[in-house]
């Protein structure tokens, strides 16, 4: 279900958070489309935190620390990377208004980025919204192989360490299925969501003042 929002300028960060708490999120048709519409899928994508899967090859890459992984170090560059065309994806739904809204959420502590670096070069990452014990993954990107996958492993480790109970992916793709993503019906999702937005989780249970090592991240996954 979706509905167009003809007056997207009226959407504020607080309105956006209330929408997430109700199971609704905004999208745009393309990066050049100035309008925003609300989406509430019939089936919702989630990654069960106790069912997150990491292949042995990816685990070796994570453990090798081939990428330096940080949190909230460069949110604007991360969302810009997610909005940029990539191989196999010529356009995205992240328009200027959405970038501004999520940057505002970031500034008040409800939106976070996880970044993967090689030297001083940002080569992958993701961002999403935190609310209570729920994290809503928005988008990810990479310019080097496995960079966004490593960022996702670090995100899940952080969510587990911080006491989160729901990782929302909005939709399920073949790529996300390899990590254990599944679809749940809207009614069941709402029950999970109502439970998740109550209570408190700590996105910074793992430190953000220094890069978390791959070994530390993988150790957290066994706690789920």
Image (spheres, rainbow, N blue to C red):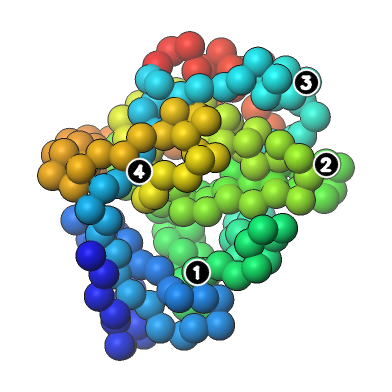
Helix, strand, or loop for circle 3? helix
Q: Residues within 10 Å of mark 1 (few under 14, many from 20)?
A: some
Q: Nearer the viewer, mark 1 or mark 3?
A: 1
Separation of residues labelled 2 and 3 (CA atoms): 13 Å
The reply to whether discs 2 and 3 touch (Cβ–Cβ < 8 Å) is no
Helix, strand, or loop for circle 1? loop
Q: Residue at x 22, y 53 (%)?
A: 42
How far across and how far down the image is residue 48, in percent? 36, 28
Q: How many marks?
A: 4
Helix, strand, or loop for circle 4? strand
Residue assigned mark 2 = 118
- Above or below for 188 versus 85: above
Separation of residues labelled 2 and 1 (CA atoms): 27 Å
Q: Quadrant of residue 159?
A: top left
Residue assigned mark 4 = 45
Q: Earlier in the sequence, mark 2 or mark 4?
A: 4
- Above or below for 54 versus 102: above
Q: Earlier in the sequence, mark 4 or mark 1?
A: 4
Separation of residues labelled 4 and 3 (CA atoms): 30 Å
How far across and how far down the image is residue 120, in percent? 84, 48
The reply to whether discs 1 and 3 touch (Cβ–Cβ < 8 Å) is no
How far across and how far down the image is residue 138, in percent? 46, 53
């Amino acid at each position: 279900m979706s509905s167009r929002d003809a007056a997207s300028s009226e959407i504020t960060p607080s309105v956006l958070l209330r929408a997430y708490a109700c199971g609704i999120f905004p999208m745009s048709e393309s990066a050049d489309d100035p309008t925003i519409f609300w989406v509430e899928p019939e089936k919702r994508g989630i990654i069960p935190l106790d069912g997150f899967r990491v292949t042995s090859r990816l685990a070796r890459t994570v453990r090798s620390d081939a990428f330096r992984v940080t949190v909230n170090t460069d949110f604007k560059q991360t969302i810009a990377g997610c909005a940029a065309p990539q191989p196999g994806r010529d356009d995205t739904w992240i328009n200027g208004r959405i970038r501004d809204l999520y940057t505002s959420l970031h500034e008040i502590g409800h939106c976070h980025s996880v970044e993967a670096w090689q030297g001083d070069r940002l080569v992958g990452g993701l961002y999403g919204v935190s609310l209570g014990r729920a994290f809503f993954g928005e988008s990810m990107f990479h310019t080097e192989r496995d960079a966004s996958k490593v960022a996702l492993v670090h995100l899940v480790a952080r969510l587990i360490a911080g006491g989160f109970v729901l990782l929302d992916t909005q939709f399920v793709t073949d790529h996300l299925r390899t990590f254990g993503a599944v679809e749940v019906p809207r009614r069941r999702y709402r029950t999970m969501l109502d439970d998740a937005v109550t209570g408190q989780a700590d996105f910074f249970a793992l430190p953000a003042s220094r890069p978390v090592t791959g070994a530390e991240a993988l150790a957290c996954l066994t706690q789920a």
